[in-house]
Amino acid sequence: MIIELKNRSDFNYITDDSTKCNETTAFVLTNQNKKYVDSVTCKVITPSECLDILGIKDSIKIIGITGTNGKTTTAAAIYSILLDLGKKVAFQGTRGCFINEKRSEEKSLTTPPILQTMAKIKDAIDEKCEYFVMEVSSHAIEQKRIEGIEFALKIFTNVTQDHLDYHGTIDAYIAVKSEFFDDETPKLINKDDGKIRFNRKNCMTYGADNPSTYKVAAYSLKDGVSAVIQKFDKMYDFYSPLHGFFNLYNMLAAISAVDMLEVAPMEKICEAVESFGGVEGRMEVVSNDPLVIVDFAHTPDGMDKVLDALKDRNIVVVFGAGGDRDANKRPQMGNIANRYAKKVIVTSDNPRSENPEKIIEDIVAGIKDRSSLHVEVDRREAIKYALHVRGENEIVVILGKGDETYQEVQGEKIAFDDREVVCSLLV
């Protein structure tokens, strides 16, 4: 990554690549490239110094969101609400980077390397943005990919089992998430989760079950999400076209966050929620007749939330599990599918370097009642089978990949989009 500078006498570029260093380029020292610092002969700067040089500090309000589930939808909702309130805003996360309603970058890491994030923040400032909303992954916290960034607000959604292939244990995973909230930065915490530690200074909370700053006083999940929020002694109501109890939390977090930023009265914030239609690949309706829904859920908790939101329907579920990732969650995912679905179809997800049949075997180990189980390694054939066996009043729910456009197999990314497959099969 190289950033060009203007009107400087000491250097004209900043890079995090030691091979690109020369007399006109400064090297920003990060946790990822520090092993190469002895090989560079150009000026070395810290991430904090880089932020100063780029004019980022005090020029834009940065909102960081972390949690196992809900990051993307909550971040996108905040972005949408701020835009509807007439603010200029950027959003960076799993779906890429967007600045003032225009996509500036395709999908990448949830939280890219620090210099790439700085470049996007600088682009947002150049486009007169007042806010930069970003997803913050546990990997990024652990690897210091947010080093030096000063957040105007930090938000926590939840912690459930995920990324244990990287963090080792759930306790280590929780510790990393907690690290993000140990300073005095204004923060918004899901009071109902109760797993992480956080500095209580400058902290507000949200929840549906426990006493909190922003508390759900009443709600309905019929035809979307309707709810009343209590903030101290005042009540505010909102409606969202999104479905599911988990989206009640996502919208509550988004509303609470925008209120903490003091952008507009709560009434206006709540009004803006209705125009947010959700995120591609998150409870996305691909077909209405038959009803086919695609979702990114790839953890036990994610699956539970999606399927619970549809529990009043007869479900045909298609799913797999990623290879080279935490294998312990696979039987749990099988068990959850078995609990909710009338018909369970287990297939391949992104097997990566693993044998997809072995991954499926791990999933099936968690399924006690196998009378409605069908195994099909080929994901396209599995989707085809689901559409074929679907009964008149049954819906097809395809989980795990959401809006991904590929399958990762033995180091190759092979074009594959669940949504396109469904549409082609229904022609």
Image (spheres, helix red, strand yellow):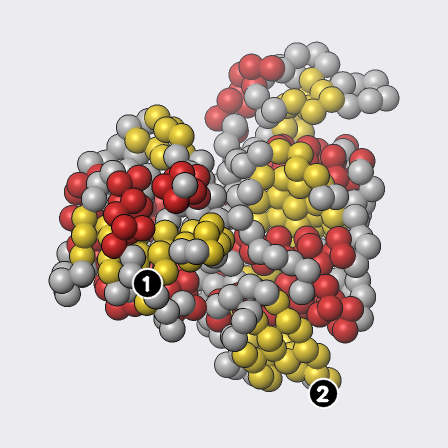
- Reading the image, the residue beneath label 2 is 233
Dot placed on the residue nearer the N-terminal end, 1 or 2: 2
> Can the viewer see residue 41?
yes
Return the residue nearer the eye: 392 or 50. Answer: 392
Q: Position of residue 16 (x, y in %)?
A: 59, 25
Instruction: Please tell me whether residue 73 is drawn above or below residue 256 in the rendered image.
Output: above
Name the amino acid type tagged 2: Asp
| In this rendering, position of residue 84 left or right of residue 171 | right
Task: Say which residue appears at 37% left-offset and 69% top-offset.
Answer: 313
Task: Say which residue appears at 71% left-offset and 59% top-offset.
Answer: 81
Q: Within 10 angstroms of label 2, few (less than 14), some, or many (20 or more) residues?
A: few
> Can the viewer see residue 145?
no
Return the residue nearer the eye: 21 or 420. Answer: 420
Q: Position of residue 342 (x, y in %)?
A: 26, 65
Q: Where is residue 334 in the image (x, y as percent from the top left)?
A: 24, 58
* Secondary structure found at label 2: loop
Instruction: Please tell me whether residue 251 is drawn above or below residue 289 in the rendered image.
Output: below
Name the amino acid type tagged 1: Glu
Task: Say which residue appears at 59% left-offset and 30% top-offset.
Answer: 29
| In this rendering, position of residue 226 left or right of residue 375 | right
- Reading the image, the residue beneath label 1 is 392
